[in-house]
Every structure is written in C-alpha cells, then in structure tokens.
Image (tube, rainbow, N blue to C red):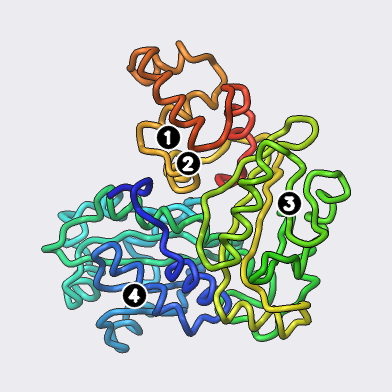
Amino acid sequence: MTAAAHIVRPDVIESIYEAAVDGGTWDTALERLMTLTGGVQGMAIWYEAQSHAVIGKSGTFDEALVATCMAEYHVNPWTEPMADVVPGHVVVLDEHVPFEALRKTGFYADILHPLDMAHGAALVLATEDDGRFSLGVGRHMRAGPFGPAQTDIMQAYGAHAARATALARRFDGLAQIRRAELAALDVMGTATIIVDEEGSVLLANRAASALESQGIIGLAKVPECTDRAAATRFRTSVMVAARGVAPPPVSFRDAMGMPLVLMAAPLGVTVADRLSGAGARGRAAAALFVFTAAPGPGPSMPMLQALFGLTPAEARVAAEIALGDGEREAARRLGIGLNSLKTHRQRIFLKIGVTRRSELVRLLARLPFDR
C-alpha cells in the first residue's frame, strides 16, 4: 500500500493533534502508528545537544532500559541521520545504518537487542536551535526493515504531525499546553483559522485577516475563497475537516493568479478544550492553514505524495516539471518518453487541481514545506 492508496484515518490525525498539546497522550498516537506500520515499539523524544527527554512511549519498554538509553546513548546511530531532516519528513534508519553495522554497536547490544528490535523509522516533527522533536517506531528483526508501504503510510501523516507540533509550540511548550494564549496565533506567519463543528470561524490570526483584507478569502462565517473555480472544493474541505475527517489539500489562486494552498485538519478534544478555555467563541473542531510563501525550492517527492496523493512516479514527474526547464528536458532527465510524461502530467493535474503546466510550476515552487 502506498501513501496514495492509504486513506488517512481521522482517529490517527486526532490523536496526533491531541498529543501535540497534551504530551501525556503520545502513547495513543504512537500505538496507532505502530499498528499501521507493523511496529512494536514507539517513542516520542525531544533531542537536545547533551540529553534527550522522552515525551511519550508505547510498547514493552522497561523504565530502566529507557533510563540507560537516555543517559548513555543520547547520541547513537539512530539519532545522527535525523540531524538535518525537514519537519514532516520520514527517515528510514536502515537506509543510513544497515543492520550489519548496527549490530556491532553498544546501542544495539544494550538497548535494541533486549527489545528484540532491529529496524526503525522516525518522523521528524520539529527542529529548533536547541534540539528537535521526533516520533520513532521500531520493528522486530523478523518483520524486516520499513519498506515503501510502511514509509508512505507514516509520511501520509507527516505534514499534519509537523503542523500540529508547530501549532502547539506557539502556545506553551512542546509537551503540554497549560494555558492557551490566543495572541500566540498572531505571531505565526502562516494564515491560521480555527473553526467549529459547523465550519464557522472562531479564531483567525493576523495573517488570515490580511488575506481577507486583500480579498483572497472571506471570514464572515464559514471560510471561503474568492477563486470561483476552487470555491466549492475550498468550502467542502473546510466542512469535511470540521466534521472530523482530514481532507486533501486544496490549491486555489488569488486575483493575480498566484497559487495558494489550503490544508485543513480536524482537532481533537484536548485541543478544543484548550482553545475554548482561552476564550474562543465556541468549541473548536478544525484548524485551517493557508500557505502563501514566497517562491522557494518547493516540497520533496515524499511530501508531494503525502499532500496530493501522487504515486512515486507522478511525484518524480511533478518535481521535474517544477524546475521549469520544459517537458522534453524533464522527460530526458527521467529517462522516459515524452508521451509517458504527458500521461503522468494529466494525472498530476487532476490530483492537484490545476489545468496548465505554468500553474503547476508556480504552485510547487511556492509550497513551503521543505524550508
């Protein structure tokens, strides 16, 4: 099963958002990711230069073993590959540290072997100057390494998990939000809107209000976009998220034809309670993010798969087309025929919601996830 075939489960999304604001519930999110990927151990860890802090764990961990790992192996063969990974991306640890090399280390002998664990993957959620936060999932030796199917499933939740963590950090820390501060939303550069179960606006930060003042979106009741071609998809995405299901991203354009992306995600009970306690005008049900980043390098192929449901082949074609060098050159670099590239291109257009190559180039060049 690939990310394109995997249906993003609302219960997993909800558990991730809940855990981001209440560190005591990471075990639930980890357990669900482990079930989907065949994992047997899971840990949510905040890594610092000198030490690590376990935020949550799921599996058969012995407390003494965890303490030994944190004290003696806070730098180990599985932490180093994550150093430069962009939030929202999955790292397959076997690709960086093959098992034959891993089994020769003290980390394996003292920590992994007692747990009968030999293979791992990690989803990086946040990186800061003083450390990073990630979810790690381990598999038994007999289960084998994480393959494309398991990796794609984890990646399907990557963008949501990174956004949940970013939203939580804007309030009051990574592990728990003791007191939600509404003003914290205003320092987010990304336009952020919180809606209730009817899709009505409860909160909108300054970046979202700026888009409204520019005539790009409306916030009078249910958020809407002024791009008529995308208006129905935009509203449907808002309502689907408000009712507890994670919809696919929606691409739309402003009056000048510049591309934007709406990403919507349902919020869990804990998040709703925190926001309501902070003075929201109703019970929060979903968070909406509208990306309007300046032109940049765009997302990686795994992120394209996760965001738009592209197959690996379609993601490669989309990434090449995004370079803007022309379709013949893109086909040459990919080693495929021009007709084959055009077939992929049409499928990409349908999934992303654009009609011309120039629109695709502009949209992918402006997506901010790899920055």
Q: Residues within 10 Å of mark 4 (few under 14, many from 20)?
A: many
Q: Earlier in the sequence, mark 4 or mark 1?
A: 4
* Residue for badge 1: 315
Q: Residues within 10 Å of mark 2 (few under 14, many from 20)?
A: many
Q: Quadrant of residue 170?
A: bottom right
Q: Nearer the viewer, residue 45 or 347?
A: 347
**From the viewer's perspective, is 190 left or right of 341?**
right
Is residue 54 something that shows in the picture?
Answer: no
The type of residue carrying mark 4 is Glu
Rounded to the nearest angstrom, the CA distance separating label 2 from label 1 is 6 Å
Residue 35 image point, x, y percent = 28, 69
Pair 2/3: label in front:
3
Disc 4 secondary structure class: helix
Residue visible at 57% across and 37% down? 298
Disc 2 secondary structure class: helix
Rounded to the nearest angstrom, the CA distance separating label 4 from label 1 is 29 Å
* Residue for badge 4: 31
Q: Earlier in the sequence, mark 1 or mark 3?
A: 3
Pair 1/3: label in front:
3
